[in-house]
């Protein structure tokens, strides 16, 4: 019988990120996925700042940035038009990748992010991650295999999988993690349901939708003079979002479906596309799929005992804001180090329970933010004359633009990206302060439970680059005595790095001398002296207290 530390069901971005996190900590895993591993259909278009930080922590953010489907100088503006060949209603300017990288050359020491948001379709990034995962020796990839069932024991889990020829195999593991999407079989085997808000039929981004992968060179050749990343079409016939994938020929169109088109064929998709363009042009409809927008659902539990869940298996989003996949990646950054600590023996009996305690409130927070944005999209006024080149049309477009001009937060939302704070976590030594939570704004704070505030130590050198794969004690006072932490960590077998930084700006940012940083870059504890408290701090942070 094959034996690994962790079996991961689902080889999408969340499952592969979990495997990479485990591999970085020396933990062996197996990915089981029914697909052949192909990544040839576009999905999400945003890898947010936090996800890019996780790529950096894993050592591959530079390679990921080179994958961009859009050329480096292609604008990432968001434009609202009456049709692709029609009149512009509103434009939200956004920097190109080249402009963002140039901006990093002139940032302040305390700039909030080491890795700007990346507007690159998930399809391109997954192809790279797929190849990268295959090259890592601690990850056993079982593509074209299906998870069938599991049997949990006090000391492990026996997992049954089936290959493409119907041959069964049993695998022994310490833990099983379902990263197998919204229809998760692992979750259903556990008998865990969803709670939250189901979709309602509204004008856009709620209810029945269709996603279509299109090759249409004529869009840029004939209609677009000033390029953008996203084109939102608003007219009396159709509501659609057309995303440029490569800055030239390939696009992803999301459109609201009428009731008679619940399962649209190519002819129906062609009609929607023509209405979005404004006239008929040559196009190849590579593939399309119906889907449902407007969901805000969170699983009733994140697992039981040795069987856990992550990603869409525990939360379903409407895609507004691009939070779904990114929230899942943050899930497994949290879960990965806790699994590694438990497998390796330095994590205590309370550590894995803290995964749900920390991440489930974040799922409610993020799904609610996405839901609010989707409802707002459906409230944009569409006047009867909005497409006309007339004074009445100008008035209708101005009315829509008055609302649309405030939509920029949908494409930034730093509070959602960076502001996850584990305020009630049992493994965080809280300082007593409460952190304001705003989905649009992020205020750096070293209050325990939140993401460690970021700083640049020099050109291209992030404070995060000093953090180790395990815990890091950030020392911001020259000569501070850290021996108690060293000794306590050694006695408990906890991997601990010491990072010494003597910069006034960083000391002011953290407002303390010592900060204990977790492997996922969240603050576990802060203080000015821990000579008599270090062991208790580490015990709590690794799940041995509570």
Image (cartoon, rainbow, N blue to C red):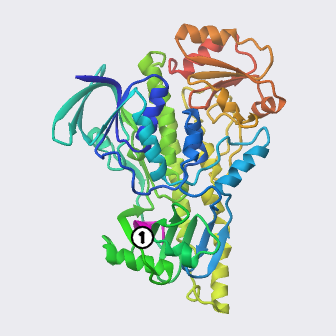
431 sits to left or right of 155: right
Residue at image position (32%, 72%) is 264
Q: Is any part of residue 123 visible from this angle?
A: yes
Above or below 356: residue 351: above
Whether residue 495 appears in magenta in the rendering, the answer is no
Residue most extreme to the right: 504
Residue most extreme to the left: 166
Q: Name the chief secondary structure element in magenta.
A: strand
Image spot of residue 499 (x, y percent): 69, 21
Q: Is any part of residue 350 visible from this angle?
A: no
524 sits to left or right of 287: right
Whether residue 214 appears in magenta in the rendering, the answer is yes
Nearest the viewer among 338 and 33 is 33
Q: Give the magenta range.
A: 204-215
Nearest the viewer among 417 and 543 is 417
Image spot of residue 191 (x, y percent): 29, 41
Residue picked out by circle 1: 201
7 sits to left or right of 110: left
How many discs mark residues in the rendered view? 1
Residue at image position (79%, 38%) is 109
Image spot of residue 192 (x, y percent): 33, 42
Residue at image position (60%, 73%) is 80
Image spot of residue 397 (x, y percent): 64, 81
């Amino acid at each position: 019988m094959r034996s690994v530390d962790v079996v991961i069901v689902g080889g999408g971005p969340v499952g592969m990120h979990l495997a990479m996190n485990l591999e970085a900590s020396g933990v062996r895993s197996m990915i089981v996925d029914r697909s052949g591993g192909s990544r040839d259909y576009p999905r999400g278009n945003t890898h947010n700042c936090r996800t890019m930080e996780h790529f950096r922590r894993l050592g591959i953010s530079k390679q990921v940035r080179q994958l961009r489907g859009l050329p480096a100088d292609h604008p990432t503006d968001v434009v609202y038009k009456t049709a692709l060949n029609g009149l512009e209603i509103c434009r939200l300017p956004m920097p190109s990748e080249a402009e963002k990288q140039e901006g990093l050359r002139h940032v302040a020491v305390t700039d909030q992010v080491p890795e700007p948001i990346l507007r690159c379709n998930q399809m391109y990034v997954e192809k790279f991650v797929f190849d990268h995962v295959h090259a890592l020796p601690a990850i056993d990839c079982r593509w074209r295999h299906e998870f069938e069932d599991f049997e949990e024991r006090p000391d492990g889990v026996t997992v049954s999988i089936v290959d493409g020829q119907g041959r069964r195999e049993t695998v022994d593991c310490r833990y099983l993690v379902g990263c197998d999407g919204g229809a998760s079989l692992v979750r259903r085997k556990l008998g865990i349901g969803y709670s939250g808000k189901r979709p309602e039929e509204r004008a856009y981004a709620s209810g029945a939708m269709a996603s279509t992968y299109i090759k249409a060179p004529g869009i840029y050749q004939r209609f677009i003079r000033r390029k953008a990343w996203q084109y939102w079409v608003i007219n009396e016939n159709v509501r659609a979002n057309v995303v440029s994938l490569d800055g030239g020929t390939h696009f992803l169109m999301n459109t609201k479906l009428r009731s008679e088109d619940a399962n649209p064929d190519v002819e129906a998709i062609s009609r929607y596309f023509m209405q979005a363009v404004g006239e008929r042009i040559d196009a190849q409809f590579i593939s399309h799929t119906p889907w449902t927008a407007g969901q805000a659902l969170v699983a009733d539990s994140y697992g039981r005992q040795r069987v856990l869940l992550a990603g869409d298996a525990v939360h379903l989003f409407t895609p507004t804001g691009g939070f779904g996949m990114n929230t899942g990646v943050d899930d497994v950054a949290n879960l990965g180090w806790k699994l590694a600590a438990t497998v390796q023996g330095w994590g205590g009996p309370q550590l894995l329970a803290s995964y749900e305690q920390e991440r489930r409130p974040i799922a409610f927070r993020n799904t609610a933010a996405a839901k609010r944005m989707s409802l707002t999209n459906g409230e944009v006024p569409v006047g009867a004359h909005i497409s006309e080149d007339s004074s009445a049309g100008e008035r209708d477009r101005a009315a829509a633009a008055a609302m649309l001009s405030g939509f920029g937060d949908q494409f930034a939302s730093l509070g959602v990206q960076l502001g996850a704070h584990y305020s009630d976590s049992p493994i965080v030594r809280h300082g007593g302060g409460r952190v304001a939570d705003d989905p649009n704004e992020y205020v750096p704070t070293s209050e325990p439970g939140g993401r460690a505030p970021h700083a640049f130590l020099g050109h291209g050198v992030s404070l995060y680059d000093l953090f180790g794969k395990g815990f890091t004690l950030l020392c911001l006072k020259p000569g501070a005595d850290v021996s108690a932490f060293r000794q306590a960590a050694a006695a408990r077998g906890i991997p601990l790095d010491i990072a010494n930084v003597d910069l006034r700006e960083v000391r002011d940012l953290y407002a303390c001398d010592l900060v204990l940083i977790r492997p996922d870059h969240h603050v576990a504890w802060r203080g000015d002296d821990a000579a008599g408290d270090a062991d208790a701090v580490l015990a709590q942070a690794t799940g041995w207290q509570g």
